[in-house]
Amino acid sequence: MIKKLLEPNASWASGLVIVRIFTGGIIIVFGFEIFDTEGMAGYTQWLTDVKVPAPRIMAYVGKVAELLCGTMLTLGLFTRLASIPLMITMIVINFVMLDGNPRNSPFYLLLLFTTFLLMGGGKFSLDELIRKRINRER
């Protein structure tokens, strides 16, 4: 019984895929705020208040990253690459816009994106389909 709990197996990989899909979905929802003019004005003001250069542009860059990379993460497409802009976005939100407290939601997302950077898309991802196709063509 203890041995089964300690062994890496397919169920752990499947669980990571579920976490990847839900995390991607959550970040996509945040990315859709790009279409909310008032919300974007609020983010721009917030970035202005914390002295981020080009606050309006940076607000839109962050939301585009959330929408585009969140979609890629959900699909498992170039998962590791998609995780990098999302990590940067969460670093800015948590450590520049907020107080850097690890209890903030962006910090948890940063940890998840770091996991996906290290682990990749998993067994059920477009990354895996691409990898298999490349290996077949060799």
Image (tube, helix red, strand yellow):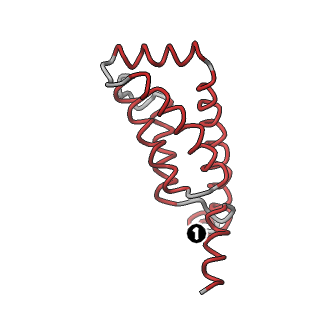
Q: Is residue 55 left or right of residue 105?
A: left
Q: How many marks?
A: 1
Q: Is residue 21 above or below residue 13?
A: above
Question: Considering depth in this image, is 131 or 40 the residue closer to the camera?
Answer: 40
User: Residue 94's image quarter?
Assistant: top left
- Label 1: few (<14), some or many (≥20) within 10 Å? few
Question: Considering depth in this image, is 43 or 22 the residue closer to the camera?
Answer: 43
Q: Where residue 64 appears, x then y in whole percent?
A: 54, 36
- Quadrant in the picture for the C terminus: bottom right
Q: Where residue 105 appears, x then y in whole percent?
A: 51, 30
Question: Considering depth in this image, is 109 or 66 the residue closer to the camera?
Answer: 66
Q: Is residue 96 left or right of residue 2?
A: left
Q: Is residue 49 above or below residue 26?
A: above
Q: Residue at x 67, y 43 (%)?
A: 22
- Quadrant in the picture for the N terminus: bottom right
Q: Residue at x 35, y 28 (%)?
A: 100
Q: Where residue 53 appears, x then y in whole percent?
A: 31, 25
User: Residue 14's image quarter?
Assistant: bottom right
Three-letter code, disc 1 = Glu
Secondary element at image label 1? loop
Q: Is residue 104 above or below residue 5?
A: above
Residue occupied by mark 1: 7
Q: Where residue 38 appears, x then y in whole percent?
A: 58, 12
